[in-house]
Image (cartoon, coloured by chain):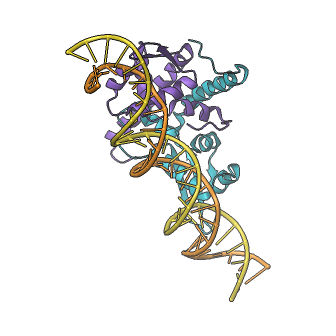
Chain colours: A cyan, B purple, C orange, D yellow
Amino acid sequence: MNEEKLFCPVEKALAVISGKWKPHIFRHLIGRTKRFGELQRALPQVTRKILTQQLRELADDGVVIRNVYPQVPPKVEYSLSDYGKTLIPIMSSLSGWGQAHIERDNHGGAKQPDG
Amino acid sequence: MNEEKLFCPVEKALAVISGKWKPHIFRHLIGRTKRFGELQRALPQVTRKILTQQLRELADDGVVIRNVYPQVPPKVEYSLSDYGKTLIPIMSSLSGWGQAHIERDNHGGAKQPDG
DNA sequence: CTCCCCTGTATCAAAATGGATACCATGTTA
DNA sequence: TAACATGGTATCCATTTTGATACAGGGGAG
C-alpha cells in the first residue's frame, strides 16, 4: 500500500490488511510460526516475489515478525507479533460479515437492498 | 472492486468496504440521507465520476440505497440500508485499530514490533 | 435563444498493484 | 565440477483502480 499520510483511521487499518494475499497469510500464521517455504507451499498461486513483498509490508507495519537465521541455505521464519494478534478479532468480524454477504448473494437471487 | 468469485469471506468483506473513498462516503451517510451534491461538497477532492462510481458499487453491494426522484433538474438521494448499517460496528473497530496504529507510528518513533 | 441547475456518462491517461521469468549467493552433497 | 536447497532480487509487463476533462439532457429563468 502506498506510504502517504492517511488521516482516516479506517483507511489506515485497511491499508494494513488489504493486500491481495494478506488475509491468507494472516490466517496461515495464526497459531503457528512458519517458514517462508511453508507459506509458499500453502499458497502455491503466489509467486515468491509477491509473497516476499506482502510479508515485508506486514512486517513493516509491525503485524508480522521476520526472523532470519544466518545459515546456508537460508532459513527465515514468520510469525504474528502481539500487535498483529490484536487484529484477530477484527479479521474475525470481517469474516462473519463476509460470510453473511456471500450467503445473501446466493439465496437472495438478485441483490435487493433491504433497508 | 472486481467481480470475481471471492471464496474468502474476509476478502469479500474487504471488497465491499475498500474503495478509495468508501469509508468517507460511509461515514457521511451514517445518521442521515444525503443528496449527491451534498456528498460532493463534503468530499471536494473526489470527482463526480469517481463519486458516482463508488456510490454505485456500494449500492450494488446492497450497502447503500440510491433513490432517484424523476425531476428536472434531477434529485438523487443516498442512504445506508439496514444491511449497510450492520457494517457500523466493523467500521468502528477498524477505526479503533487504525487510530492505535497511527499513534504507534507517531510516538513509537521507528516501527518496532512488540511481540 | 441562452444559460443555469443537477446528476450523471464518455474518453483517455496516470498511478497503483500484481505477476512472469530469469538470475544470485553459498555451503553441502554426489 | 556441477547440481541442490532456500529465500530472495532485477526487469519488464499486465491488470486494476483512480483521475482530468469535456459533453449530455431538458425544463425554468432572464
Q: Is residue A106 visible?
A: yes
> Could you tell me residue B30's position as x and y percent?
43, 16
Relative to B65, does residue A65 appear above or below in the rendering?
A: below
Relative to C24, does residue A92 appear above or below in the rendering?
A: above
Q: C17 or D3: nearer the eye?
A: C17
Quarter of image, res A52: bottom right
Q: Exactly how many numbered labels are in the figure?
A: 0
Relative to B48, does residue B29 appear above or below in the rendering?
A: above
Residue found at x 49% / y 19%: B88
Relative to B11, does residue B64 appear above or below in the rendering?
A: above
Which part of the image, by quadrant, shows the N terminus of chain B?
top right
Residue found at x 69% / y 23%: A103
> Could you tell me residue B41's position as x and y percent?
32, 24
> Could you tell me residue D21's position as x and y percent?
33, 42
Q: C29 or A100: nearer the eye?
A: A100
Residue found at x 58% / y 28%: A94
Q: A52 or B42: nearer the eye?
A: B42
Name the side, left or right, on which B40 lies relative to A40: left
Q: Is residue B94 visible?
A: no
